[in-house]
Image: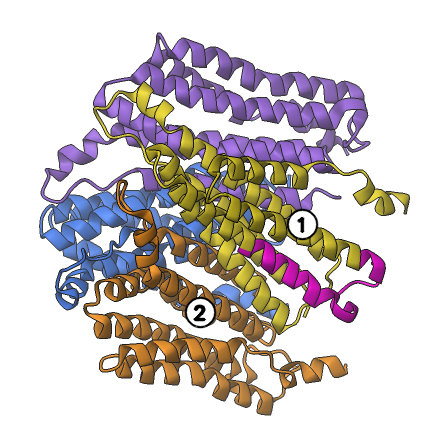
Chain colours: A purple, B yellow, C orange, D blue
Amino acid sequence: MNTNRIEAFSDGVFAIAITLLILEIKVPPSGSALKAELLSLWPSYLAYAISFIVIGAIWINHHAMFEHIVRADQNLLLLNTFHLMFVAFLPFPTAVLAQALHDGADEPLATSFYGGTLTVIGIFVTAMWRYAAHEHRLLSSHISQDEAKRNGRRFLVGPVCYGIATVIALVAPWFALMFYIALNVFFLWPRHTRHAGKNAT
Amino acid sequence: MNTNRIEAFSDGVFAIAITLLILEIKVPPSGSALKAELLSLWPSYLAYAISFIVIGAIWINHHAMFEHIVRADQNLLLLNTFHLMFVAFLPFPTAVLAQALHDGADEPLATSFYGGTLTVIGIFVTAMWRYAAHEHRLLSSHISQDEAKRNGRRFLVGPVCYGIATVIALVAPWFALMFYIALNVFFLWPRHTRHAGKNAT
Amino acid sequence: MNTNRIEAFSDGVFAIAITLLILEIKVPPSGSALKAELLSLWPSYLAYAISFIVIGAIWINHHAMFEHIVRADQNLLLLNTFHLMFVAFLPFPTAVLAQALHDGADEPLATSFYGGTLTVIGIFVTAMWRYAAHEHRLLSSHISQDEAKRNGRRFLVGPVCYGIATVIALVAPWFALMFYIALNVFFLWPRHTRHAGKNAT
Amino acid sequence: MNTNRIEAFSDGVFAIAITLLILEIKVPPSGSALKAELLSLWPSYLAYAISFIVIGAIWINHHAMFEHIVRADQNLLLLNTFHLMFVAFLPFPTAVLAQALHDGADEPLATSFYGGTLTVIGIFVTAMWRYAAHEHRLLSSHISQDEAKRNGRRFLVGPVCYGIATVIALVAPWFALMFYIALNVFFLWPRHTRHAGKNAT
């Protein structure tokens, strides 16, 4: 089984989840002072922006992974389904986070709940790669075993860092929030070395 | 008429239905005890997870079927449209089920309503295959009539089991719920024999 | 400009609009008698089913049309955008219709509002075909001018019939509703002659 | 990295954002005078139509741009993600605008908020083109440097005009609204010269 359909289906879920995020921002009730209300929604804008960038980074990551994974079996399909289950879940912790920041209450729990979701997403990314790379099971022959291992270590960065931030969130929610943002800036930052091999060909 | 467009359109509906499920989980009202509220939402998480896996399994199943169906006519299109109508309906019984479990009221009816929807989905899957396989009408020549019949029997497992569980749900909702989960684990479980023929080529 | 992207974008809008319909069916409030509530939602199920089939038929129709339209220009793009605007609008009159049937109030207006939307959709379908077929502007050379004219007449059936039903709805809403359903059964009914030319090649 | 996946993902987001717009139009409450209610929703219909056409024009524009951009790097991906973030945000200012027009209150702010979103979308469109066209970095060789510069100037029309309208909206909201519509009519208007080069080949 080739991977085109998994990629197309996953892209669909990513695109929908990323666009549904806006539905969690509710229009201020009629009759309220619009300016104050729009300004007071900054936690919703912040949560929207973070989740949008997170899903954007997951999407890019997913593609980078499936440039090397060229076959799929039932186990990979299953891991990918669980991965998508938590990506599609993200609008919910996003809304919980926005409300906690807005109310100035329960920020530690809400930030940790958000980080926990990101951690689980990251764990499934790592699991997919480990499964696919085990004995080069589902990988293209264009990637060496050494490179596959290096990638495996890089995919660990996400869940480990998110996991740490999830715990930190319980005592320092704003620090954890900054950490989530920094991580995604790191994931999305242009890396010249990554494409070096390809450009050479 | 070839089947590419039916598959692409169906994939779109599957991806959207699976991602819309999250919209049924409502953010706890502002001012409530967040921890208790998030924990009390376990029926929503459970219903979300079951429906996500159910639609995931339907998607995989649909693809497995359209590996063998290589032509489409108006009747198949019609059957597929009804199939999608009930798949896209699933977020509603999912939310009804989550609420019943949360309230601890009407679980038999809600579980049976949910199972009934799965049964109808399964009936349309079977109907599509029967129609396509009748006199090898719309099938590829790569599948033998015997294999087509075996597949037909396998596609019957879903609606028959779901149908039985729908009735059981009226007296033992939790047993039926476990049964829905077990069925999907069975559907998603790796089966080496299934791909044997392909690997041999 | 070729038509692949218009078709893919339109398919996306159709798939999303058809799947969003379910969001208009609200879960009965907690604490109510679930059985009675689920039964009392029959107008929502009916409206859901009709709109699902309507969008399904529009989708099939759109594809049938773009089998013959092989080029696109800015005007066609504009007409298609307006066509999609009213297709994506459909969940709103669907919900209005369901509520009117449920309340047993304002059925004539709600049914007419629904039919009016279908009429406008049909007008844009016809307009697209007329524009594309004028002097064979955007059509494939595989379709003759006579056949194009015959198709043009067939595309007129929709808006004319819907237009008449929209007026009838104001005095006999249930009759109009039956008429909408009958029309779509007619649109979706297998027609052997339609594919005769293709099968012959 | 080629641009197919960016285009497919962006198209997905455009299609979903454009279709979600309808969810912001709420069904009138049960028991109200339906005719008066449906008529009083004209600001929602207007805002829906404007946003639908705006996203339609953005989609067409995006495609026109990616006819010339043939390679993608991480920076372009990042700019595109921010572009999509504001496109997917549009249903929110659309709903705010509809409510302000409906209430006859806060129109200047709501119209300016709406225009501000369009301005930011336009800025990212321009930024993407500037980045891609800088030293012909990511462009096809089929477009000359002169033509790239002309396109760059044309892409500036959007954000500059929207920016001006955003300011005007604060004192003359209806004038700004008319200006948004006029701009999109201009963007969508058939231009024979644009495709001249292609038709010649």
Compare residues D38 and B77 and report the one nearer the observer.
Answer: B77
Pointer 2 residue: C54
Residue at 66 percent of width and 28 percent of height: A128
Compare residues B173 and C177 and report the one nearer the observer.
Answer: B173
**Image location of residue C157, percent across then percent down:** 44, 85
Disc 1 is placed on an element classified as helix
Mark 1: which amino acid? Val
Residue at 68 percent of width and 45 percent of height: A4
Mark 2: which amino acid? Val
The vertical placement of A198 against C166, above or below, is above
Residue at the far front in the pictured view: B171
The crowding category of the residue bearing disc 1, from other C-alpha atoms within 10 Å (few below 14, some 14 to 19, many at least 20), is some
* Residue A189 visible: no
Pointer 1 residue: B157
* Residue C3 appears left or right of B110: right
Q: Which chain carries label 2?
A: C
Does A80 lie within the magenta span?
Answer: no
* Discs 2, 1: same chain: no
Q: How far apart are marks 2 and 1 (CA)?
A: 31 Å
* Residue C168 visible: yes
Compare residues B49 and B163 and report the one nearer the observer.
Answer: B163
Residue at 66 percent of width and 42 percent of height: B187
**Position of the N terminus of chain B by quadrant:** bottom right
- Bounds of the magenta segment: B120-148
Disc 2 is placed on an element classified as helix
**Image location of residue A190, percent across then percent down:** 56, 26
Q: Do the residues labelled 2 and 1 touch (CB within 8 Å)?
A: no
The image quarter in which residue C115 lies: bottom left
Residue at the far bottom in the pictured view: C146
The image quarter in which residue C89 lies: bottom left
